Image (spheres, rainbow, N blue to C red):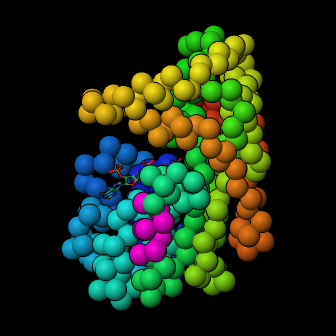
Amino acid sequence: MKILLTGATGLLGGAMAEAFPSNKHDLRCLVREDSPNAPRLDGKGVEIVHGDTRSEADLRRAFSGVDAVAHVAGIEYAPTVVSAMRAAKVERLLAVSSTSFHSRFEFRSRPKVEMEAVVKRSGLSWSIVRPTMIYGSELDKNVHKLLRFLDRSPVFPMFGDGENLWQPVYFEDCAKGACEALVREEAIHEAYDLPGSRPLTYNDLVKTAARAMGTNTRIVHLPIEPVRRGLELAEKLRLPLPVKSGQVVRLREDKAYPYGKAERELEYSPRAFGEGVAAEVERLRGVGMVRG
Ligand SMILES: NC(=O)c1ccc[n+]([C@@H]2O[C@H](COP(=O)([O-])OP(=O)(O)OC[C@H]3O[C@@H](n4cnc5c(N)ncnc54)[C@H](OP(=O)(O)O)[C@@H]3O)[C@@H](O)[C@H]2O)c1
């Protein structure tokens, strides 16, 4: 099968580019010309086409002659992707959404619900995967920052009591699940949550990361409410802020998801956070991002 992959210079897409068996599939990657991570694809034996997922003309050119599209570079571009696929007469689509689809906070769930609806109404042979928070390399947006913080500070300030649940997924496990969802016929018109192996509390997540780093970290809990109220006031005053009050409130929401469907239908078998974070520490030490 000839597959067009978007987002191949990113955390998940990069791992997917490695996970598709090259003896079975040909990979073409749509890459922005100015992507700082384009060199990561050098020597991977993939075809590169330059383009931007916001441009339907770029997408049509990239989709020409492929059998399937694995769209990883943001479900917010689904309308353009679907339209370009119709024009290029490509039927099979894998779209990467997020488990924030399930959030009880509408500002988190609505964008995913709306974009998934575009995919589901497309008339294409679609599959959707929904990762939880993805970690595992210096490209992740969260755990690598936590590890670097733990490397520098003996104290970790935490909003709230830390008893809320997380279920982060190791990037290579998530990539494997996503690739399976694209190549399996029975995954057509199905959506799969792709979390890590088990939920753990925020407290345990930080303690497990600290153990992997070999640091003796003390967690200091900070109350959420005053911070939320301060942010809310700043929002009313239209002050520019790095975080929204809603994001702080969402810290209280459990982000734990069963994955029996992916286990049964995709042979999905993610690793435990302790194992994944130890691999990430080793990787960051290898590139000198945390001390050895
Ligand atoms: N990371 C998470 O914790 C997480 C959790 C749930 C769902 N997801 C979803 O999973 C997907 C992949 O996440 P990720 O963490 O791998 O993201 P990432 O590391 O930020 O990578 C994003 C990729 O998309 C490409 N891209 C972005 N905008 C583009 C555009 N306009 N045209 C062409 N390429 C574009 C980027 O290219 P450049 O190299 O040019 O920037 C990069 O290759 C996203 O859809 C994300 O919403 C992620």
Q: What residue is shown at x 64% (from left), y 68% (from top)?
A: 192
Residue ID at (60%, 72%): 191
- Identify the main secondary structure in magenta: helix
Residue 228 to residue 96: above or below: above
In the displayed structure, would residue 42 be above or below residue 123? above
| Residue sitting nearer the eye, 123 or 227 | 227
x, y (%) of residue 152? 56, 13
**Is residue 34 covered in magenta?**
no
Residue 181, placed above or below residue 160: below
Find residue 42 and report its horizontal and vertical position in percent. Answer: 40, 52
Asked where in the image residue 128 lies, by quadrant, the reply is bottom right
Image coordinates of residue 4 in percent, x first then y, are 42, 71
Instruction: Tell how many labels.
Output: 0
Viewer-side residue, 196 vs 116: 116
Among the 4 quarters of the image, the one containing residue 261: bottom right
Q: Is residue 19 visible?
A: no
Left or right: residue 122 versus residue 208 is left
The reply to whether the magenta stretch includes residue 112 is yes
- In the rendering, at what x and y percent does residue 64 appear? 32, 81
What residue appears at the point 59 percent right and 82 percent down from the top-left corner?
188
Can you say which quadrant of the picture contains the C terminus?
A: top right
Answer yes or no: is residue 284 visible. yes
- Could you tell whether 254 is left or right of 92 in the image? right
Which range is magenta? Answer: 111-118
